[in-house]
Structures are given as structure tokens and as C-alpha cells.
């Protein structure tokens, strides 16, 4: 099961999304008065405390991580595994859309928005999921060719 290259890609995508869940993804610095705002997947931490209005980021990335891990164990059903990879890609793209909307809605008028390293991890996970899907499709073609030869 884990010997297949797509299983390794999905495992690495799972690890990337879990690491992104734990690290800060951005820092918003107002140009005038005010403290720095740290943006995590679960909350926004300001000088006044934590604001849990960004739980959507956490939910999307948690679903993506669970889907990556669950897709590894569907090695017997390659068609379903391919569909789950596509769903995972849509989730990772949706995460970036929600991140953009969240950054726009939570930041002051004059601000400096600095992305952290963890913000690129969902993009890396999306590339890995895409490569896993290509491996699943390749395996399906090999199985069909072997069945046709018999």
C-alpha cells in the first residue's frame, strides 16, 4: 500500500497540511498605531486577545488532511481514489480563496500583509495531490491494459 508512489505523495500532502495547521500563516502589521496581528488557521491573535472568526480556514485544511490520509487506504478502488484527489484539490484551492477573503476582511485600512512560510504548504500539498492523482490514473491504465491482454 505505502510502496506506491501516489501513496507517498498523499502521505507527504497530509504532513504538509498538518504542519500548516500548526504554524502561523500570516502577519498583518498596521502602518499607524496598533499592534501586530498574527493569523493562524484557527484564530487571529491580536494584542487584545484571540478572535476565532477564521475557523473556516482550519475546517477546510482539516478536511483536506483527513481526505489525504483516507485516500491512501483506497488503493483497491482507483476510480474513487482519483475522485477524492480531485475533491482534495478543490479544498486546497478553496483554502487560498478563504485566506484572501479573511486577510481582506480582518486587516485595517493601511496595513502590511506578510505571508509566512506555512502559507505555501497547501500549494505544495496541492502539487503532491495532483502528482498522486496522475499516479492513480497511470495505475488504472496499466490494470486495464493487463486485463485487455488476458
Image: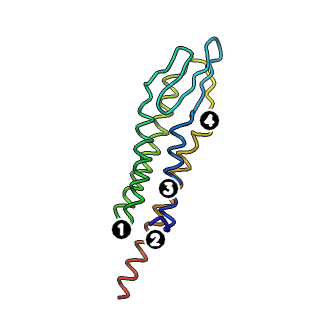
Q: Reading the chain from its start, which is encountered first: label 4 or label 3?
A: 3
Looking at marks 1 and 2 on the same chain, the residue that comes earlier in the sequence is marked by 1
Q: Which residue is mark 2?
A: 138
| Apparent side of residue 35 relative to residue 99 in the rendered image (left or right) | right
Q: Earlier in the sequence, mark 1 or mark 4?
A: 1
As measured in the structure, the alpha-carbon distance from the residue carrying label 2 to the one carrying label 4 is 35 Å
Quarter that holds the C terminus: bottom left
| Mark 4 lies on residue | 116
Whether 144 is drawn above or below 4: the answer is below
* Mark 1 to mark 4 CA distance (whole Å): 38 Å
Question: Could you say where residue 114 lies in the image, as x and y percent from the top left?
Answer: 63, 30
What is the residue that sits farthest to the bottom in this orientation? 150
Label 3 close to label 2 by CB (< 8 Å):
no
Q: Tag 2, which secondary structure?
A: helix
Look at 46% across and 40% down and name the residue there.
Answer: 95
Which residue is at the far front? 2
Q: Secondary structure at mark 3?
A: helix
Inter-mark Cα distance, 3 to 2: 18 Å
The residue identified by callout 3 is: 11
Q: Nearer the viewer, mark 1 or mark 4?
A: 1
Q: Which mark is residue 76?
A: 1
Above or below residue 141? Residue 119 is above
Question: Dot 4: what SS?
Answer: loop
Residue 66 locus on image (x, y percent): 40, 48
Amino acid at each position: 500500500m505505502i510502496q506506491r508512489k501516489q501513496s507517498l505523495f498523499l502521505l507527504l500532502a497530509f504532513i504538509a497540511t498538518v504542519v500548516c495547521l500548526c504554524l502561523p500563516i500570516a502577519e498583518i502589521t498596521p502602518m499607524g498605531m496598533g499592534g501586530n496581528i498574527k493569523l493562524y488557521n484557527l484564530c487571529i491573535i491580536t494584542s487584545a486577545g484571540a478572535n476565532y472568526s477564521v475557523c473556516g480556514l482550519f475546517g477546510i485544511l482539516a478536511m483536506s488532511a483527513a481526505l489525504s490520509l483516507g485516500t491512501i487506504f483506497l488503493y483497491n478502488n482507483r476510480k474513487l481514489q482519483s475522485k477524492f484527489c480531485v475533491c482534495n484539490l478543490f479544498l486546497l484551492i478553496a483554502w487560498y480563496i478563504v485566506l484572501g477573503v479573511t486577510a481582506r476582511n480582518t486587516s485595517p485600512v493601511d496595513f502590511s500583509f506578510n505571508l509566512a512560510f506555512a502559507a505555501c504548504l497547501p500549494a505544495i500539498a496541492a502539487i503532491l495531490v495532483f502528482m498522486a492523482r496522475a499516479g492513480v490514473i497511470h495505475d488504472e491504465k496499466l490494470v486495464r491494459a493487463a486485463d485487455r491482454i488476458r
